[in-house]
Image: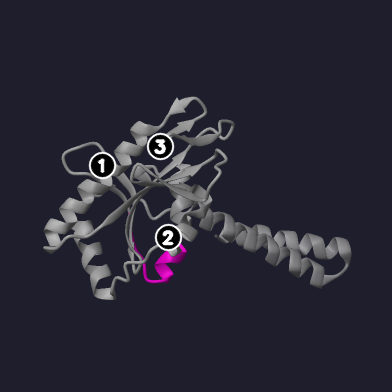
Amino acid sequence: MLVRGAVAAAVGVAAGLLTADWRIGATLGIGTLVAFVVHASRRYSEVPRWRKPNAAQRRTEAQLRLMKRLGYRVLHARGIPGGNGQIDHFVVGRRGAFAIDSESWDKRLPLRNKLEKLYHGKFSKNERIDEALEEARTAQKLISERIGREIDIRASLAIYGPSMPWDSHNLRGVDVITGTKVRKWLRSGKSQNLSEKEIEEIYKAAEEVLPARY
């Protein structure tokens, strides 16, 4: 941060000398520092570095930071006991509980739904849909058993890259979401109206039964 501040100061001084106007120099210096801060915040991840979140996971995580300010609780990179599956983002808030996986796919190939099957170009993505659904169902079973009552967890895939004819579309029990619209998707749709106590209860149970991936 000290280096960035020094660079911003240097930019401001240079601009001030070149324009002979200290106000222009100060404006450019502040603008440079703000740009550094914004860039750093976009790259920051709550997931420890050794778990190596990919670009898609970081982009979804950035959207979820605002949801946390609205009372949502979030866990990242949680494993599925007894298997190799991973829920990239477990989210619980007043609208319910969600298991979100983030994916980056080739933007040159269109994404389409044909007869309730998902295709990326000519390639079927049904196996990935089924995996996301199985992960969510397993998490739902484990959390329900831990808290002693049945809860519902919505499975979803946040896709970055290819164009899609929808912001979100439920396919075979999984919400397929335009990656940049995750926050909008979480704030729309049917609400479960969970209380703060229920949110915290589900979050704590998820933290216990879904191990962090290392």
> Which residue is rendered at x = 29% and y = 43% of the image?
133
Q: Amino acid at mark 1?
A: Glu
Q: Position of residue 160 (x, y in %)?
A: 51, 43
Which residue in the structure is indicated by mark 2? 186
Which residue in the structure is indicated by mark 3? 116
Gap in angstroms between the C-alphas marked 2 and 3: 23 Å
**Left or right, residue 17 beside residue 8:** right
Q: Amino acid at mark 3?
A: Glu
Q: Earlier in the sequence, mark 3 or mark 1?
A: 3
Q: Which residues are magenta?
A: 65-75
> Which residue is rendered at x = 43% and y = 65% of the image?
67
Identify whether 84 is placed above or below 99.
above
Q: Secondary structure at mark 1?
A: helix
Tag of residue 134:
1
Q: Amino acid at mark 2?
A: Leu
Asked whether residue 214 is in view, the answer is no
**Left or right, residue 117 beside residue 206:** right
> Where, by quadrant of the figure, is residue 23 drawn?
bottom right
Query: What count of labels does the image hold?
Result: 3
Q: Secondary structure at mark 2?
A: helix
Asked whether residue 80 is in view, the answer is yes
Crowding near pointer 3: few (<14 within 10 Å), some, many (20+)?
Answer: few
Q: Earlier in the sequence, mark 1 or mark 2?
A: 1
Whether residue 36 is in magenta: the answer is: no
Q: Position of residue 202 (x, y in %)?
A: 23, 63
Identify whether 25 is placed above or below 210.
below
> Where, by quadrant of the figure, is residue 31 drawn?
bottom right
Viewer-proximal residue among 195 and 166: 166
Q: Position of residue 170 (x, y in %)?
A: 40, 47
The residue lying furthest to the top in this view is: 122
